[in-house]
Amino acid sequence: MNMDAFEERLKALRPRLHRYCARMIGSAIHGEDVLQDALVKALHARHQGAEVDNLEGWLFRIAHNTSLDFLRSRSRNAVVPLTEDIEAATMPQTEVVAVSFRTFLRLPELQRCAVILKDVLGHSVEEIAAIADCSPAAAKSALQRGRAALQQLSRAPEDARLPLISDADRRKIAAYVDLFCSGDFDTIRAMLADDVKLDLVNRLQWQGREKTTPYFTRYAEVSKWRFALGAVEGLPAMLVFDGDGPMDGPAHFVLVEWSDGRIAAIRDFLFAPYVQEAADWVRLG
């Protein structure tokens, strides 16, 4: 497989890889960071001449290890003790997919890996074993126990809620959204830090006030977008709705960071709709 074909395959697999990373670490937003790190590792290995027989399995193995590195660096994964009744009926696949990330995060790592790969992404037990670097017997056991544990955990009330947005952060993102709604992009440009960073996730990255000009110009040229104040995974966000489609959920979202009263970073998920599909979001206005 030549490099162009390799990169096209990476692009095609990106949503599936994100579904895995997001559930493994408990965040759709940070799942994209982990995925990007994994893809950089894959590209580097390919440039170094790595021979790959099963590309999808190889990529999931890299994504799996990168997710574990992230979890261990953050020490986020709190495993909750379960009762001994581990033989409970398992959940239908549609219900497994709908389980919150916080619930997945309460499973031990191998159980979480097995359930996500089998019941969310459709991998075989043998493929799970290869990705997780364990025996098929261990993968099968983890899958059975993970399914039963997930069934039990899903019946328990959620004990973690999204953090509240501070009044200061709410005022900042509300002002930003209002300026987008009115089309006053000149005022937004005046708020930018000189070294502002713009990340169009899964497309490109720019840095510097002058380089961000085309970004706002293109938004000004598209009339279908509708903007609203919201939060995604507890972070203040501008929710972007497609006025030509259903308005029951945002098409994508934008995160904005400030420093010393200036906009320091903009992270726009327009070209990564798979992140929105998995993220916890709420409209605030």
Image (spheres, helix red, strand yellow):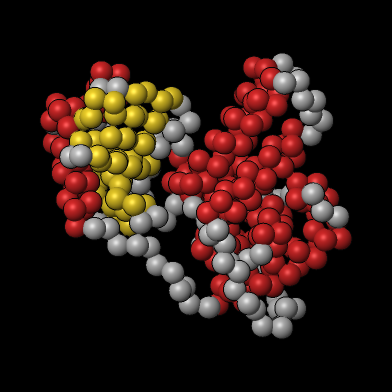
Q: x, y (%) of residue 42? A: 66, 30
- Based on the displayed image, in which of its 4 quarters is residue 15 positioned? top right
Q: Which residue appears at 46% of the width and 37% of the height?
A: 272
- Based on the displayed image, in which of its 4 quarters is residue 189 positioned? top left
Q: In which quarter of the image is the C terminus?
A: bottom left
In the displayed structure, 143 sits above or below 127; it is below
In the displayed structure, 220 sits above or below 30; it is above
In the displayed structure, 280 sits above or below 141; it is above
Left or right? Give the position of 69 relative to 255. right
Instruction: Judge by depth and name the residue closer to the eye, 182 or 66.
Output: 66
Q: x, y (%) of residue 116? A: 65, 55
Q: Which residue appears at 17% of the width and 50% of the height?
A: 171
**Does the rendering let one see residue 19?**
no
In the displayed structure, 67 sits above or below 78; it is above
Left or right? Give the position of 245 relative to 279. left
Q: x, y (%) of residue 168? A: 19, 53
Q: Which residue appears at 47% of the width and 73% of the height?
A: 158
